[in-house]
Image: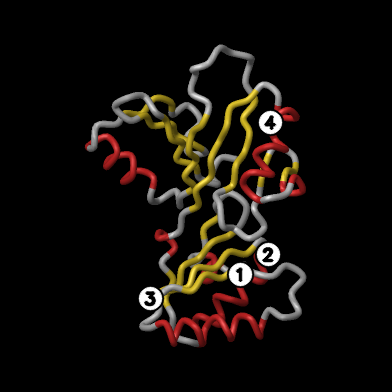
Amino acid sequence: MSEIELRDWRKLAQALHARFGTKSLAEGARFVQAVGEACSDADVVPELRLGATFVDVASRDAALAERISGIAMEYGLTADPLAVAQLEVGLDTWDLAAIGPFWAAVLTGSTDSFKGNDILDPTRRVANLWFQGTTPHETPRQRFHLDLWLPSEVVPSRIEAAIAAGGKVVYDEEAPAFIVLADPQGNKVCLCTAEGR
């Protein structure tokens, strides 16, 4: 991917993500149609979400992402790579096989969405759920936590805002890959980036 087009995209949990600003829903729809036509022969189809003043795009293929950036340039659209984010939910467990199928069925309606240590909804209606291995423990120990994937440039300002709102950094030894914050009651969230992985 060329440096110019790479500036449009940020790697989050499973894919490259970009947000292109539009002046109207109609302009966004024309861009989405152009991307659809240009990518009809692609082996990996991009995911597009149309909003009133933006189009969000996710692609697992760097060459396809580059093609989409070229289309955006033709349409005069500007990318805002710092506006992308992806939310995942993490669940601590010591017995993945016992609970994974349940959560897949509840969240997506099918145990087929349970692969490895992830549940990925193919329709993207619900956040990804991933399972973090842990040792057996008594309830109530925190089991769920959020993983918020962000562009690395955004993380410092999010940490600053979280601290100003009463939170604190509780773990940063693996930064920039992830930093753990806690709210005033100790509930945790990981700010994750693709860097250092």
Kind of residue sitting beneath label 1? Ala
Decide: marks 3, 4 in contact (CB < 8 A)?
Answer: no
Identify which residue is drawn at 62% across, 77% down. 67
**Looking at the picture, how far across and down is residue 78, in whole percent?**
42, 76
Identify which residue is drawn at 27% across, 34% down. 163
Question: In the rendered image, which residue does mark 1 sit on?
Answer: 65
Q: Nearer the viewer, mark 2 or mark 3?
A: 3
Query: Which residue is more in the foreground, 34 or 90?
Result: 90
Decide: marks 3, 1 in contact (CB < 8 A)?
Answer: no
Q: Secondary structure at mark 3?
A: loop
Query: Which residue is more in the foreground, 111 or 160?
Result: 111
Mark 2 → mark 3, Cα distance in angstroms: 25 Å
Mark 3 → mark 1, Cα distance in angstroms: 20 Å
**Relative to residue 106, is residue 5 depicted above or below?**
below
Q: Nearer the viewer, mark 4 or mark 2?
A: 4
Mark 1 → mark 2, Cα distance in angstroms: 6 Å
Question: In the rendered image, which residue does mark 3 sit on?
Answer: 53
Kind of residue sitting beneath label 4? Ile
**Looking at the picture, how far across and down is residue 144, in whole percent?**
51, 31
Label located before the other in sequence (3 or 4): 3
**Looking at the picture, how far across and down is residue 134, in whole percent?**
62, 21
Dot 4 alpha-carbon crowd within 10 angstroms: few under 14, some 14 to 19, many 20 or more: few
Kind of residue sitting beneath label 2? Asp
Label located before the other in sequence (2 or 3): 3
